[in-house]
Structures are given as C-alpha cells and as structure tokens.
Image: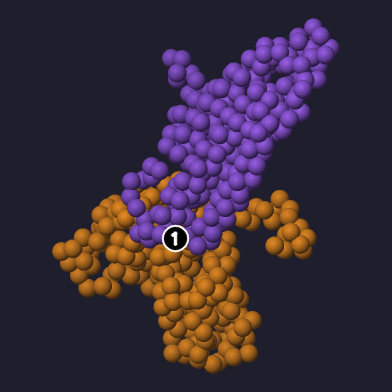
Chain colours: A orange, B purple
Amino acid sequence: MDVLAGKVKMTPQTMNTAMNPIDALERPIRLTARDVTVHYGAKQALHGISIDIPDRAVTAFIGPSGCGKSTFLRCFNRMNDTIEGARVGGRIELDGEDIYDPSLDVVELRARIGMVFQKPNPFPKSIYENVAYGPKIHGLARSKTDLDEIVVSSLRKAGLFEEVKDRLHEPGTGLSGGQQQRLCIARAIAVGPEVILMDEPCSALDPIATAIIEELIDELRENYTIVIVTHSMQQAARVSQKTAFFHLGNLVEEGVTEDIFTNPVNKQTQDYIMGRIG
Amino acid sequence: MPTTGTDHIVTAYSDELTFLAQSIAEMGGLVEVAIENGTKSLLRLDRELADLTIIADQRIDDMQRRIDDMAVSMIARRQPMASDLRAIITSIHVASDLERVGDMAKQLARRSLKLEGMNLQPTFYNGVKNMTALVLRQVKEALDAYSNRDAEAAIEVCNRDDEVDAMHTSLFRELLTYMMEDPRNITPCTHLLFCAKNLERIGDHATNIAERAYYLQTGKQLTSEVQELQRTQIKT
C-alpha cells in the first residue's frame, strides 16, 4: 500500500515491472521439450510432453501427486540420469542445443540449469563454503577476491546477505528453513546459470519464509528463466506467468497463468484447480 | 445451479456456492416483486402498496450486504479459482445491480405518493404500463440467464435493451404531447417521465446482469463486438 500512501510514485515504468503475463509468452523460447517420455523400468511416467519454456519468465508446473511434473522438471537438467532404470525419450533443447547429446558435459549442463529442491539441503559446511563450492569446482574464480565477490553477490541476489554477513563462516545448517532455502538458491546462482529449476521450493517453509522466496523468484525472473513445480495452486498463480497442468503423465493444458486460473479450457484442469472431484 | 458437473472435494465449499447462488435468486425474486409493486402502486395510486414497497427495499439492501459479506468471506477462506471465482465476483456485481433496481422500484412507489390527488387520465399510463412489462421481462430473463449460466440468453437480453430505449423515447414524446395539450398535465406527466427514466435505468441494470451472466459462463467480457457478431449470425 506504499503506492496509496504516496511513498511510491506510480509511473508507467514502475507499472511495467509487473510483467504483463501475455508478454511472457511472447518472449524468446529458452527451453524446448518435444514428445518427451520417461519410463521407470516398465512403468511409463510421462507420455510425450511437448512444451516451450519462455526466457526470463516463471513457468509453473501444477498437478496432483504422481502426475509427472517433478519427473518432467528433472528431465531439464538430466537429474533422471541418476535414477536407476529411468529412460528418457524425445528431445529437450536449451537454446536449440540437444541437452541429451552424449557428447554434452552433464556437470556443465547442471551449472547452466541449476536446481533448488523441496527440502533445503545445504552442504554441512559454512555459509561461505556452500556458495563458494560451485564456482570453485567450475573454476569460475581466479582469485580469493573473485570468489569473495561471487559469494557476496550470489547471497545478495538470493536476498540473504544482510541476514548472514556477520556469520559467513558459521555452518549453513544453522540457518532457519527459509534462510537455508535462500542459501541453496544462492548456491545455484553462484555458478551463473541461465535456468533455475525449483522443485516445490516452499513446501517445507512457513508462510512468511514462503512469501520471501516468492518475492525473490519475482526478482530473479528478470535475469533467469525459472521453472517451478508446486503443489500450491495459489503459489503458481502468484509467481508464474505461464502455467502447465499435468495429470497422469500427460500435459493436459498450458497457457498464460491468468487464463489457466480464471478460465481454463480443459475440464480436468477446471476440476483440479477448483478443487472438485474429477 | 449448473456447474461443471462435479462437486467440490470440500462439501462445505459446494454448499456455500449453492447458498450464494440461492441468495442471488432470492434477491432477484424480491426485486422483481418490488418493480411490479412499485409500478402497481403508481398506476393505482395505492398508498398501502407503495408503503409496502418502500419498506421491502430494506430487505433488498440487507441481502446485498449479506451477499457481499459471503463473497468476501469465501474469497478469503476458499481462494476460489476459475468459474467458482467468476461466480463469486459476479454475485457481488449482480447483487449491487439488484440493489440499485430495488432503489428505483422504491422511487416508483414514492412517486405514487406524490401523484395522489392529481388529475390523471388512464391514457397517460399505457406507455408506463407497457414499459414496465418489457423491463420486468428483461430483469427476469437476465436473472434466468445468470442462474442457468446461459450465454446466448444473456446476449438476447443485451440486444433487447434497444427496445427499452426506443420505448423510453416514444414515451417521452407521448407525455410531451399531453403536456402541450393542457398545461395542467405538466406536473403529473413530468412525474411519469421520471418514472419512465427509472424504468429505462432498470433496463440498463438488467443488461448489466446479463453481461455478468455471459462473463460467468464464458470467462470473457461481453463486448459490443460479440453482440454484433451474434446479431449477424442470427440474421444469416
């Protein structure tokens, strides 16, 4: 209500920072998935998913448990490679480049496409080390000063620096849940990714910590392409510009977030988002 | 109330939505009666009926407040989505339109008290009578389109508003003629002109309700382009 109180002057520019959701879909495409299938052994978890992920916007995947939304998210940085018996079919491209190309370095891919998980999982090291680890192994810092700079700027971007600046060398695990999650976001940012995948990043957090993360997502989307899986439809409605609804391993409907939550076309989507028994 | 055909997992939520729809229907019923009684009291110069109509408006106002409270509470507690959200938002709008219609019916009744003892010829009334019938039909059909979520019926109501406007214009001319014939008619005919204006405004609110019905069903605003498209489709 700062605007009403006259503290913030509403100019056309401030209004523009709230992105028009339709604009989000007109942005260049960063990630493309075509006919993606995933099998866990004999069980097919995803049935030919095709979707475009717009650049520097938030795309949300929603759907009931077991619908395949997390499985699909994990395809984008090849996390399914680590699951025994998982087979991924179809094609996923990052800027037109096939990310399942055998010659591609998966470690490098995961630096370009970072991930934040449901449960905050800082390394059992200091706050500083948590953020510095990635840049170190990727050789992104030439000197200690370089590294310090990366750590500070990543913590700043994750909105955590002010809270931890006096205890950078204390263990990351000593932070609160919300702070730990922001530490994990800082860790993902530190290696300079283009895309950040978030798998239910707020489900273990209280409403205040959730709001802080959501505010952060909104800021990050100016520089990063974000894909978020969430159980909370309200969260998807709040943070994303594009929403995709999954059900039983299929992509049922995708579109501008506003349309999905006010006037979805598909009956399954309607029933799900309205909390009706389908 | 037709919905998507499936119930909410939380039954209390379904019950609340049903109750909200019923409340709109009930308020609509009260408003229809108010228009009928307002005009009747005017045409018959029935003081008792006029008083009844004026008092009954309090109940209509109460219902609007109740519907508003219900809607706000449901938005806060249930975080409604899609057609549920539209049902709740439109109910606020429709209740507000109905409340205004109720006020206008009350004004019709009040005017009947002012007309008492004046020289009124039955011919003065014909136009008002016909206009009331048309406007009542508009309100009724707009409310039906709303409760049945019938987008086509809603468009028909909107298109028919032209008839109400045309009738208002011709009634204006007619009453003007009576005034020119005999200056003693000026006072009663001016009162009747205000009544005609009220009826015309009620017609506009009926159109608003029909527009909400269209939005509720389709999720899209009823623009003049949509109406025009529908008209050409009917013609061809």
Q: Nearer the viewer, residue A7 or B104?
A: B104
Camera sees residue B170: no
Q: Which residue is mark 1?
A: A233
The chain to which mark 1 is attached is A
- Residue shown at 33%/61% (left/top)? A64
Q: Tell me if residue A155 comes above or below residue A255 in the rendering.
A: below
The C terminus of chain B appears in which quarter of the rendering?
A: top left
Q: Secondary structure at mark 1?
A: helix
Q: Nearer the viewer, residue B168 or A68?
A: B168
Residue B87: percent from the left, percent from the top?
A: 48, 46
Q: Tell me if residue B134 comes above or below residue B19 in the rendering.
A: above
Residue B54: percent from the left, percent from the top?
A: 67, 39
**Left or right: B179 in relation to A97:** right
Camera sees residue A147: yes
- Mark 1 residue crowding within 10 angstroms, few (<14) / some (14–19) / many (20+): some
- Asked where in the image residue A214 lies, by quadrant, the reply is bottom right
